[in-house]
Image: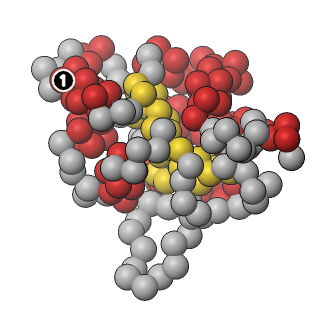
Amino acid sequence: MSDAPVLHLVVCAAPPAQRIGELAELLAADGWRVCLIATPIAGSWLDRDALAAQTGHPVRVQWRRPGDPEPHPPADAAAVVPATFNTLNKWAAGASDTLALGILNELLGTGLPIHVFPRVNAALAAHPAYAPNLRLLREAGVVVHDGDVLRSPDEMTPSRWAVVVDALRPARPATANPDER
């Protein structure tokens, strides 16, 4: 499926990250070529070797050295699943202190579709910086989905992941319909 559209899937450190392989499998079955980028803490939670074997691409956590080849193909779209309070606020502020944030900041400037699925508890969602930062990201073109999709890790069934897959389907380039291959 090397001609499949590429989805850069950014994974933050929230409980659904521990089952991100299930989402990657469903996205691949839906016609995406999935490249995982994890925040440093999320990266420590993942079986990166197993996910690399599953997706065919290394799970990126750290910046590459100057001159090293880019390990992922260019994105056709991106998703942040799960998106944490910390990552969302830092992204809105333009911080690039992790590879995940650096990639998100660069992608924001490309105009490619970016979808975000927050996993933020009610106390953090009530923080005065959160709503304005989500609004800023939306105004920049990011599609921010209802956080209830990822609410409880024990509810992360395939049907819950299917909500994410369905939401990302319109972001797939029109020329990349898996039924036309």
Residue appearing at x 25%, y 24% in the figure: 135
In the picture shown, does residue 168 fall above or below 62?
A: above
Residue 24 horizontal/vertical position (percent): 66, 42
Judge left or right: residue 48 versus residue 137.
right
Q: Circle 1 — which element? A: helix
Which quarter of the image is occupied by the N terminus?
bottom right
Residue 98 horizontal/vertical position (percent): 31, 57
Judge left or right: residue 47 versus residue 125.
right
Residue labelled with disc 1: 132
CA neighbours of label 1 inside 10 A, class few (<14), some (14 to 19), many (20+)? few
| Residue type beneath disc 1 | Pro
Quarter of the image holding residue 155?
top right
Judge left or right: residue 19 versus residue 84.
right
Q: Residue furthest front?
A: 175
Residue 101 in sight from this viewpoint: no
Residue appearing at x 40%, y 25% in the figure: 144
Please name the colour scheme applied to the rendered image. secondary structure
Question: Along the line of sight, which residue is nearer the eye, 158 or 77?
Answer: 77
Q: Residue furthest left?
A: 128
Quarter of the image holding residue 124?
top left
Residue 141 in sight from this viewpoint: yes
In the picture shown, does residue 86 fall above or below 155?
A: below
Residue 147 horizontal/vertical position (percent): 43, 19
Q: How many numbered marks appear?
A: 1
Residue appearing at x 41%, y 44% in the figure: 111
Residue appearing at x 66%, y 54% in the figure: 51
Q: Residue furthest bottom?
A: 67
Judge left or right: residue 54 versus residue 138.
right
Residue 120 horizontal/vertical position (percent): 35, 24
Question: Along the line of sight, which residue is nearer the eye, 156 or 55?
Answer: 55
In the picture shown, does residue 47 fall above or below 117?
A: below
